[in-house]
Image (cartoon, grey):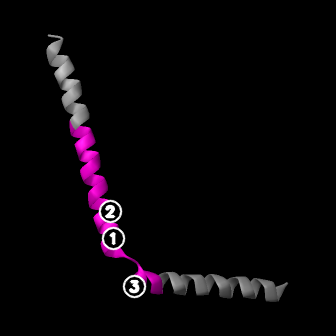
Amino acid sequence: MGNIIWDIHMAALRILEVRSAYCKSDFEWDNLKRLAFKMVDESNTRLMRDYVLETSHAESEK
């Protein structure tokens, strides 16, 4: 039983090491940044469109 627990701890440690190395050297941060900007732009456009539609209906009802 002790060996299994030791193996699990060693596997967890290895996963943490690999994750750290991946973030530092291989992760595509530029791609993530580009995608985040794209999503923000699309969301802002949708919010502005919805706002204009809402307010234009309110104005036409007066």
Query: Can you identify the residue that label 2 sits on?
Result: 35
Marks 2 and 1: CB-CB under 8 Å?
yes
Does the magenta-highlighted stretch encompass residue 34? yes
Quadrant assignment, res 28 = bottom left
Amino acid type assigned to the residue bearing label 1 in the image = Asn
Does the magenta-highlighted stretch encompass residue 49? no
Amino acid type assigned to the residue bearing label 2 in the image = Leu
Depth check, mark 3 against mark 2: the one in front is 2
Please name the predominant secondary structure of the magenta segment in the image: helix
Q: Give the range drawn in magenta.
A: 21-48
Q: Say few, some or many: other residues with alpha carbon within 10 Å of mark 3 (under 14 / 14 to 19 / 20 or more).
A: few
Depth check, mark 1 against mark 3: the one in front is 1
Identify the residue at horizontal 55%, vertical 82% (top origin). Answer: 16
Amino acid type assigned to the residue bearing label 3 in the image = Lys
Query: Can you identify the residue that label 1 sits on?
Result: 31
Query: Can you identify the residue that label 3 sits on?
Result: 24
Identify the residue at horizontal 23%, vertical 44% (top origin). Answer: 45
In which quadrant is the N terminus drawn? bottom right
Residue 15, image x and y in percent?
58, 82
Q: Earlier in the sequence, mark 1 or mark 3?
A: 3
| Residue 18, disc | none
Identify the residue at horizontal 17%, vertical 23% (top origin). Answer: 56
Residue 22, image x and y in percent?
46, 83
Distance of label 1 from label 3 (alpha carbons)? 15 Å
In the picture shown, does residue 60 fall above or below 51? above
Identify the residue at horizontal 22%, vertical 35% (top origin). Answer: 49
- Left or right of 58? Residue 1 is right
Residue 58, image x and y in percent?
19, 18
Distance of label 2 from label 1 (alpha carbons)? 6 Å
In the picture shown, does residue 59 fall above or below 19? above
